Image: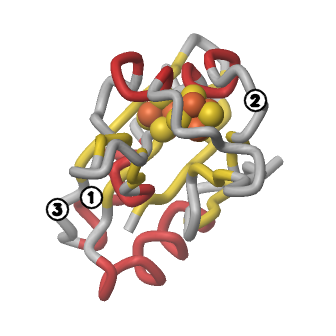
Amino acid sequence: MKMIVRISSAAHDPVLAKVILSTGVAINVDRADLDATSGEIVLEVPADSCARVANAFEREGASVAVLEHPIIRDNDECVHCGACIGICPVNVFTYEPDWSVAMDESKCIQCGTCITACPHDALTIEIEPE
Ligand code: SF4
Ligand code: SF4
């Protein structure tokens, strides 16, 4: 499952490494936005290890949220124009044989690119933790 984690003092404290070592869980980093004072990372974590990993991050002072629906589409607004297909870096959107646009939200890394590209404002990102 996708999980978003916000860490403070990321450059000085190897929080991610500590969580991997303490839990023994193979964590895949989908997106990382880190600087000297804080950081935000989107992770792919095995579903049966989510609670353990989230608890380990919280013990390190990070805020954590499991992304049940990382990208949300308003199907009343979507006109299946396809503008989101080519710009998504992880191929969340694809054409179906009938040229409707399908969506695999489980791939989304919350980069935000499609939000501004959609001409009908049909896409929103699930609210992230503070
Ligand atoms: S860009 Fe917006 S309107 Fe076009 S297919 Fe994607 S979600 Fe639908
Ligand atoms: S925010 Fe949009 S463009 Fe970025 S990964 Fe998710 S679906 Fe793709």
In the rendered image, residue 73, in percent from the top left (x then y), is placed at: 65, 51
The three-letter code of the residue at mark 3 reads: Ala
Residue on which the image places disc 1: 20
| Number of residues whose C-alpha sits closer than 10 Å to that of mark 2, classed few (under 14), some (14–19) or many (20 or more) | some
In the rendered image, residue 126, in percent from the top left (x then y), is placed at: 70, 53
At x 63%, y 60%, the residue is 64
Decide which of 30, 56 is in the foreground and name it: 30
- Secondary structure of residue under mark 2: loop
| Number of residues whose C-alpha sits closer than 10 Å to that of mark 1, classed few (under 14), some (14–19) or many (20 or more) | some
Is the residue under label 3 in contact with that under label 2 (CB below 8 Å)? no
At x 24%, y 56%, the residue is 27
Q: Is residue 66 left or right of residue 22?
A: right
Q: Quadrant of the N terminus?
A: bottom left
At x 28%, y 73%, the residue is 23
Q: Inspect this view and state whether residue 62 appears.
A: no
The residue at the far front in this view is 98
Residue on which the image places disc 3: 26
Decide which of 6, 14 is in the foreground and name it: 6
Front disc: 1 or 3: 3
Label drawn at residue 34: none
Label drawn at residue 120: 2
Q: Is residue 129 left or right of residue 70?
A: right
Q: Earlier in the sequence, mark 1 or mark 3?
A: 1
